[in-house]
Amino acid sequence: MTSEKPQREFTGRHALMVFGGAFAVIIGVNITLAVNAVKTFPGLEVKNSYVASQEFDQRRSAQVALGWSVYASASKDQVKLEISDADGNPVEVVKLTATLGRATHVREDQTPDFKFNGKAYVAPAQLGSGNWNIRMVARARNGAEFSQRVILHVKG
């Protein structure tokens, strides 16, 4: 006695369900990725790009005239920011503000309290491994503003 199972037929209804399910998954993933992208990266560099562009050349010339270079490093629970002049001497600025954070989101942003130790600016900071950005603004004794994004690589 052999009993044969009747073969199921692949109908247009089945094809519609397969294609509909595939497109639903694709659309769902795209919406999820778009929402997360907007949530984690604000995308705003300046409030008014036209006004910022009008002052750009003047600020850049003043910054280049300073001849400063900046190097960042991290060790244990401390971040160090070295600002040096054209001769390689450490620079003590009038005012230094900085935001330390990831390039991809603002969740881990910190505003370290940098103190000058005679050679560099140091501040306590909690850093996980990976790439970090220090967005710094320093004011020179002559009033010129020096702003730069310094990339910091922290090994785990």
Image: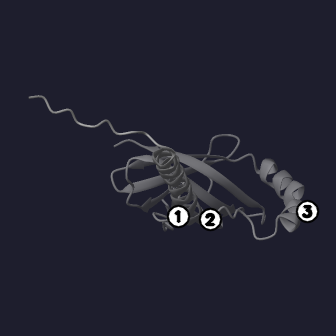
Mark earlier in primary sequence (2, 3) = 2
The percent coordinates of residue 150 (x first, y second) are 59, 49
Return the residue nearer the eye: 84 or 54: 54
Tell me if label 2 and label 1 are in contact, CB under 8 Å. Answer: yes
- Is 38 on the left-hand or right-hand side of 59? left
Task: Determine whether 3 is above or below 54 in the image.
Answer: above
In the picture, the disc for residue 42 is 2
Q: Please state which of the two labelled residues, at mark 2 or mark 1, is closer to the viewer.
A: 2
Q: Residue at x 37, y 60 (%)?
A: 126
Q: Where the C terminus falls, by quadrant?
A: top left
- Is 25 on the left-hand or right-hand side of 126? right
Task: Determine whether 70 is above or below 146 in the image.
Answer: above
The percent coordinates of residue 106 (x first, y second) are 52, 64
Q: Secondary structure at mark 2?
A: loop
Question: How many other residues sit within 10 Å of disc 3, few (<14), some (14-19) or many (≥20)?
Answer: few
Q: Please state which of the two labelled residues, at mark 2 or mark 3, is closer to the viewer.
A: 2
- Is 28 on the left-hand or right-hand side of 83? left
**Residue type of the residue flagged with mark 3:** Gln
Q: How many marks?
A: 3
- Is 50 on the left-hand or right-hand side of 112? right
Residue hosting label 1? 106
In the picture, the disc for residue 54 is 3
Residue furthest right in the image: 54
Q: Secondary structure at mark 3?
A: helix
The percent coordinates of residue 35 (x first, y second) are 55, 63
